[in-house]
Image: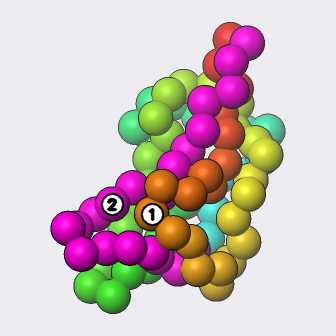
Amino acid sequence: MQAVPVLLPRLGSSMEEAIFVEWLRAAGDRVEADEPICVIETDKVDAEVVAPVAGVLGPLLAAPRETIAVGAELARITTA
């Protein structure tokens, strides 16, 4: 098994951080690659962050209304 980090992506050249809004899936849920797993808010847009790989989601490392830097780890997905 391998733990793959879910990182906050840079959605624009000037984006340095975002506000975490909510999880769309819970820890322990099976997720597929490219499936939306959470929502973030930037100065310009609300966006969904997708799973980079298929596997089991968790632990969840971001909390609602928390400000997160680009590249920070939001969660991990364990692959088989």
User: Which residue type carries mark 2?
Assistant: Arg
* Residue at disc 1, secondary structure: loop
In this view, 11 is above or below 17:
above
| Magenta residue check for 2 | yes
**Gap in angstroms between the C-alphas marked 1 and 2:** 6 Å
| Magenta residue check for 52 | no
In this view, 66 is above or below 78:
below
In this view, 25 is above or below 76:
below
User: Which residue type carries mark 1?
Assistant: Val
Which mark is drawn over residue 10?
Answer: 2
Q: In x, y percent, where is residue 61?
A: 73, 57
Which mark is drawn over residue 70?
Answer: 1
User: Between disc 1 and disc 2, whose residue precedes?
Assistant: 2
Q: In x, y percent, where is residue 74?
A: 62, 55
* Residue at disc 2, secondary structure: loop
* Marks 1 and 2 close (CB-CB < 8 Å): yes
Inspect this view and state whether residue 36 appears. Answer: no
Task: Tell me where residue 80 sits by quadrant.
Answer: top right
| Left or right relative to 59: residue 20 | left
Coloring scheme of the render? rainbow
Which mark is drawn over residue 34?
Answer: none
Magenta stretch in the rendered image:
1-20
